[in-house]
Amino acid sequence: MTITDQSGVRETSPPASSTVPRTAPPRALALRLHFYAGVFVGPFLLIAALTGFVYAFAPTLEKLVYGRYLAAPAVTDPLPESRQLQAALEGLDPATVQSLQTAVPGGTTRVVVADPTVASGQTTVFVDPGTGKVLGALETDSGDLPLRAWLSALHKNLHLGDLGNLYTEMAASWLFVIVLGGLFLWWNKARRDRDRGRRARLLSVDRSVTGRRRTLNWHGAVGAWAALGLLFLSATGLSWSDHAGANIKSLRNEMSWNAPALNTAVAGGSTAAAGEHDGHGDGHGGSAAAGADPVDVAAIDGVLHVARAQGLTGQLSVGIPAPVTRAWTVKETAKTGGDSIAVDGYTLRVVDRVDFADVPLAAKLTTWGIALHMGTMFGLANQVVLAALAVALITVIVRGYRMWWQRRPVRAEGVRFGPLPRRGALRALPWPALLAIAVITVPVALFAPLLGLSLAAFLAVDVVLGLVSRSRTKTPTQKEIAS
């Protein structure tokens, strides 16, 4: 493999088999992995950052776009929820109702009904709690309004379905590897600068340098500032992925890290638990089960009265069952986690209760992590932090590519890229270090399959480049001997 230095003189690199890294093997290995991951996974991360930046402001954008559906005059004495529900269901089959979300001051009441005429199968009707006037209806997807549902799909899979899901899982899988590798390299540089009598910089930029060194300073400092947030986004993003996410769910089940399921079986009815109601609380409706009487939706006032008497406060989400053999569910919608109860709609007896305080810590962290990742936990401040992390990631990626470009041989003919990090770091490691790397890498690769497969692809590319390098260095030598 030949490279051209800054003066335009062509050099021949030594054979790969005799190449010895100029830096310590751990740093050389981290540099090579960080480089390959940055070059090949960078585009995936860049797309995720750009779409994530827009999605971060989805809650605020919803208020601007759907203000006429979401806002209503604040009232001190709203109409009973049963009257609001009846207004929302005017002209509709009561058996299609799925849930009702009570209004907050200045907001509207939301009634979710099954609607086979729309793609999501669900429509939300918005009711003024003071007058009972229906302000309109929108197709929703698991409770998400159209704008947020569209932005969510854009961020998750670029509207490409299962194929698009691979891009976000690839990005989330590699993000934590790139961040940890970058932190190690940046700390190592600061340590070497200190040993050489220079100022060690981790969180600041050396403005006295120019060119590639200036770009490296910005790349490292911004990455160090954003590292903790990026690791958080990687972990929470993987929990939604198809393959690694399935493994995470299995681990949570094995370790009993899930919130207890709210039991909705009433006397004489089904004994199944309400696991299917987890999430947004909108999967309660449809049509009545065969042979079962439909639920009396007017019972919602009594159910809510029981829930509030049991200490549930704030905005409440009421799951309305289709058959009488199931209990109603009421859950607090607080983003920091809420209590929930199941109530028999006929006897108004509390069937079951799950308090958030009693939920396992891992389940609480999952709830908080999802809310933070979606930008809903702390309102606009949460959204600004997410946007800042997206901008930081974009900056780090762009400057990473710029550093590679700045290393190119500027006087060479044609388009040339910068040289690759030197080979041989893995062979230079002692066997205990190699064993430790294998012990860590193999389980991680199995847990995050896309990470493992892409890592294998990187290794294959590296081997091919090594073979090409050897062939290019041997051929000129043989010609010289022949002449």
Image: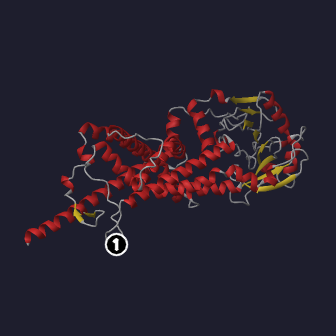
Residue at 57% in and 30% down: 361
Taking the image as drawn, is residue 40 in sight? no
Q: Which of the two residues, 223 or 62, is positioned nearer the viewer here?
A: 223
Residue at 31% in and 69% down: 412
Hey, which quadrant is residue 157 in on the image?
bottom right
The image shows residue 470, relative to residue 128, as above or below, that is below
| Image side of residue 156 versus residue 62, left or right | left
Please give the count of numbered marks on the rendered protein. 1
Quadrant where the C terminus lies?
bottom left
Residue at the extreme front: 208
Residue at 31% in and 42% down: 26
| Image side of residue 77 versus residue 208, left or right | right
Q: Which of the two residues, 428 or 107, is positioned nearer the viewer here?
A: 428
Which class describes the residues within 10 Å of circle 1: few (<14), some (14-19), or many (20+)?
few
The picture places residue 175, in percent across and down from the top left corner, at: 47, 48
Q: Which of the two residues, 68 or 279, is positioned nearer the viewer here?
A: 68
The picture places residue 210, in percent across and down from the top left corner, at: 42, 54
The picture places residue 61, in percent across and down from the top left corner, at: 71, 53
The picture places residue 181, in percent across and down from the top left corner, at: 40, 45
Taking the image as drawn, is residue 22 in sight? yes
Hey, which quadrant is residue 66 in on the image?
bottom right
Q: Amino acid at mark 1?
A: Gly
Q: Secondary structure at mark 1?
A: loop
Quadrant where the N terminus lies?
bottom left
**Residue at which label 1 appears:** 414
Q: How is the image coloured?
A: secondary structure
